[in-house]
Image (cartoon, rainbow, N blue to C red):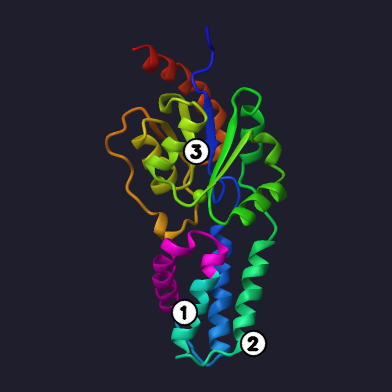
Amino acid sequence: MDRRGFDLIAFDGDDTLWHNERSFRDGRVRFRRLLADAGVDLSDEDVDARVSRFELANLERFGYGVTSFAMSLMETAIEATEGRISGGQVQQLIELAKRMMTEEIELFEGARDALDALHGIYPLMLITKGDLLHQTSKLERSGLGRYFTFVEVVSRKTPSVYETILNRHGVDPSRFLMIGNSLKSDVLPVVGAGGWAVHVPAALSWSHEHAEAPAHAPGRFFELTTLAELTRLVETLESAVKTARDA
Ligand SMILES: [Mg+2]
């Protein structure tokens, strides 16, 4: 008799295992100063609104990540300065993006312990959105790479993206658990695909990741304050998964 209820447990990376959003917030602050140096003094709110507009428009073509962010900053700067931004100032934006690519990785409380406790029992997968090179480099620099059997860097996190991953690995959704900070990317599509999900909200999350909690996912969706509580929850869920499966 198989003692495991889950065949695969997956984690989101950004703002679940390691800090990410605050790096983008810092980037926007530096960007505002750069605009001020270029003679355009905008409020934080105005900069946020302008950058967000370009980011949303760019998601479709450039996806998520620092490269896409940098393109959005350049477009915002061109618009805000009415084309007067100089080559030197564009270069500073590129330097800003390069710095973001190599920033130190800081883990969330309980992240390493949770992976350490679970990786001997379950195959673990990282499912993260963004630039392939940046995401794999973050994983490497985080020191968490050894806990993951599988790594999936995806362009978006929809139910069909999850279904494709699970199909490829021969995992039934009812035996799959996903942990992440985003209801929109890590919880709703997983529950929608028939899996289980744990939401660990981060203090800072990207506004585009906002969503309402699933209303019709009885017993398949859980919320934790910190990853330090995860191992105990997984132990509790084990019997629930088996009961659901045997029903
Ligand atoms: Mg995330």
Q: Is residue 106 visible?
A: no
In this rendering, is residue 197 above or below 24? above
Q: Give coordinates of residue 39: x percent, y percent.
A: 52, 93
Helix, strand or loop at label 1? It is helix
Of 84 and 100, nearer the camera is: 84
Mark 3 residue type: Ile
Of 126 and 104, nearer the camera is: 126
**Which contiguous range is marked in magenta?**
44-69
Task: Tell me which numbered mark, 1 or 3, is placed earlier along the sequence.
Answer: 1
Give me the residue at 59% from left, 25% from top: 122
Mark 2 residue type: Gly
In this rendering, is residue 22 above or below 83? above
Question: In front: mark 1 or mark 3?
Answer: 1
Mark 1 residue type: Thr
Q: Which mark is residue 91?
A: none
Other residues around mark 2 within 10 Å, as few (<14) / some (14–19) / many (≥20): few
Please give the residue where the numbered disc 2 appears in the rendered image. 88
Report whether the residue tagged 1 is closer than 8 Å to ligand 1: no
Q: Quadrant of the C terminus?
A: top left
Of 45 and 88, nearer the camera is: 88
